[in-house]
Image: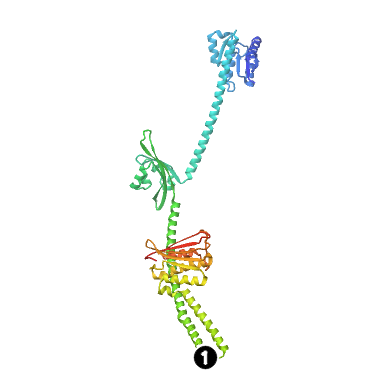
Amino acid sequence: MKKILAIDDNEINLELLNQVVKLYYPDFEFLRACNGEDGIELVRQKNPELILLDILMPGLNGFEVCEILKSEEATRNIPVLMISALGQDSVERTKGLNAGADAFISKPFSRTELQAQINVALRIKNVKDLLRDRNKDLESLIKSQTNKYLLSEERFLQISEHAMEFYWEVNSEGIFTYVSPVVEKTLKISHLEIIGKKKYQDIFQISENKYSIIAKNSRINDFEVELTVGNNIIWLSISGFSFFDKEGNYIGKRGVCYTITKRKQAEIALIENVKQIESYQKKLKSLNIEITLVEEKERRRIAENLHDSLGQTLSLAFLKLSSIIDEDCSQNIKNIITETSGLLDIAISESRSLTYDLSPPILYELGLIPAFKWKLEQLEEKNRIKTVLIGEEVQIEIQKEFNIFLYRIVCELLTNIIKHAEATLIELEISTENEMYCIFVRDNGIGFKNNENKKSSAGGFGLMSIIERIDSIKGHFEIGSNQSKGTTARIIIPFNKG
C-alpha cells in the first residue's frame, strides 16, 4: 500500500493532515513522526510516496531533515512538501527550496491548496518513477546490445584471424583503402604494405583487359584469378560491388577474396585424369578392333580348313560308300552302308553349317546384303518364323574389315529376338539417309521396358556389347520397345567411315 509521511512536532497539525489524507487519498496509508530523527528513520524503512515536512521542530529542523533525505540515494527521489508558518517569508521559502524541497505551502493552509500541491507532487513522482524505470530498461537494453556487439565483434575477429578469406576496399582509382590483415596468410604481404600504396590490379595480377571488365560491372561474383606467390601458383575467387556517394558518383569497390587453390588443383588433376582415361579408352577401342579382326581372321582360317579338309574328306567317304551299295553283297551289309552314308550326309551338312557360322563365305564373296538374306533364310528355316528383308537393292560400302562387325551386330540382334522376344515376324530394313546407312531390326514380340538391362544368351552384356561394337566402327545405336508391341533397333553408320 502506498504511504504519505507527515513530520511535525505539533500533534494537532499531524491529526489535521491525517484527516486530509483520509478524505482525499483513501488508498494511501498515513504515517506520522514527531521529530526529524524519527521522520528520517521512517522514510528509510517505509519508503513513502510523499513527505509533508514542518520546518520549526526541536532537534533537527525541516531544512536539515530535507538536506539529509536528498543526500541519500534511496530517499532523494521522494518529493518533499514543506508546510510552515514561515512560508510568507521569501527568504525562508528560498532556503527550503535550496535544501531540496519540491514545494512550499504556508500555515494556516487551505485544504484545496494542500490537495492541489499533493496532487502535483504525486504526479511528478509518478512521472519521475516511470522515467527512471524506462531509463533502467533502456540502460539494460543498451548494456545487453553492447555486450552482444562486443561478443559478436570478438567472434568475428577470432574467425577472421583464422579464416583464409580477406576483405578489401579500393577507391575510384583502384588503390586499396582497406584490406584485412589476414591477407598476409594468402598473399604473403602485409596489409600495411598494401593500403594506400598498391593498386587492385597489381595485387591480384589482373591484366588491363580483365580489370576493365571488372571496373565496368557494378557487381562481380566469384571472379577467378591465378596468381604467382613466391614459387607457388594460387587461385583466388573475387566477389565485390561498387559504392557511390549521395550524388551517385562512383567512389570505389568493396569485396571479399578467398583461396580456391585446392579446388582448382583438384579440377586440374581431374581434367588430366579424364584425358588419360579418354586416351586409354581410345587405345582400348583400337585394341578391341584389332583383336576382333584377328579373331575373325582365325575364324575364317578354321572355317576354310573345315571346308577344305574335313568337308572334302567326309564327301569323299560318302561317295565311296555310295559306290558299293549296288555291288553284290548281303542285305545286312547294304543296310549298314545305307545307314553309314546317312550319318556321313548329316556330318557333311553340320560341318557346312559350322563353317558358315564361323565365317560365312557368302559375306566375303558377295557382301553384306546377301549375307543378311542368307541369315534370315536360315532363321526362317530352323525356327519357323517369318522374315522380311527390305532394301535388298541398297549397296553398303564400308571398309571391308568392318563388314564382319556389322554382320555380327545384326546376327546378335536376330539371335536375341529368337531367344527372348517370342516373335512371329522379323523385319530387317536397309536404307540411306543424310549420307548415313540405316539398318532397322524389328520384331512383333513381347518387347521389354526401355530401362531393362538385357543380357545376351552368350553371357555378354547384351545391348552394352552391341553399343560398344557399333561405336568402334564410328556408328550410332538406338533401341525402342513397348511391352507387348515389339522392339525396334536402329543402327546408323556414315557412308565413308565405317
Any part of residue 280 in sight: no
Residue nearest the observer in this picture, 143 or 422 = 422
Which residue position holds label 1? 327
Residue nearest the observer in this picture, 492 or 226 = 492
Q: Which quadrant would residue 45 be assigned to in this image?
A: top right
Q: Which quadrant would residue 471 be assigned to in this image?
A: bottom left
Quadrant containing the C terminus in the rendered view: bottom left
Expressed as whole percent of the image width and height from the top left, the position of residue 129 reads 57, 22
Quadrant containing the N terminus in the rendered view: top right
Q: Is residue 366 above or below residue 259?
A: below
In this rendering, position of residue 95 left or right of residue 402: right
**Mark 1, other Cα within 10 Å: few <14 / some 14–19 / many ≥20:** few
Residue nearest the observer in this picture, 90 or 371 = 371
Three-letter amino acid code at disc 1? Answer: Glu
Q: Secondary structure at mark 1?
A: loop
What is the total number of numbered labels drawn onto the structure image?
Answer: 1
Expressed as whole percent of the image width and height from the top left, the position of residue 211 reads 35, 45
In this rendering, position of residue 45 left or right of residue 329: right
Expressed as whole percent of the image width and height from the top left, the position of residue 481 reads 50, 60
Q: Is residue 52 above or below residue 267?
A: above
**The furthest residue to the bottom:** 328
Residue occupying the point 45% across, 52% down: 263
Expressed as whole percent of the image width and height from the top left, the position of residue 426 reads 48, 66
Residue occupying the point 44% across, 59% down: 274
Any part of residue 114 in sight: yes
Q: How is the image coloured?
A: rainbow
Residue occupying the point 47% across, 76% down: 355
**The furthest residue to the left:** 208
Q: Is residue 487 above or below residue 329?
A: above
Q: Is residue 179 above or below residue 311?
A: above
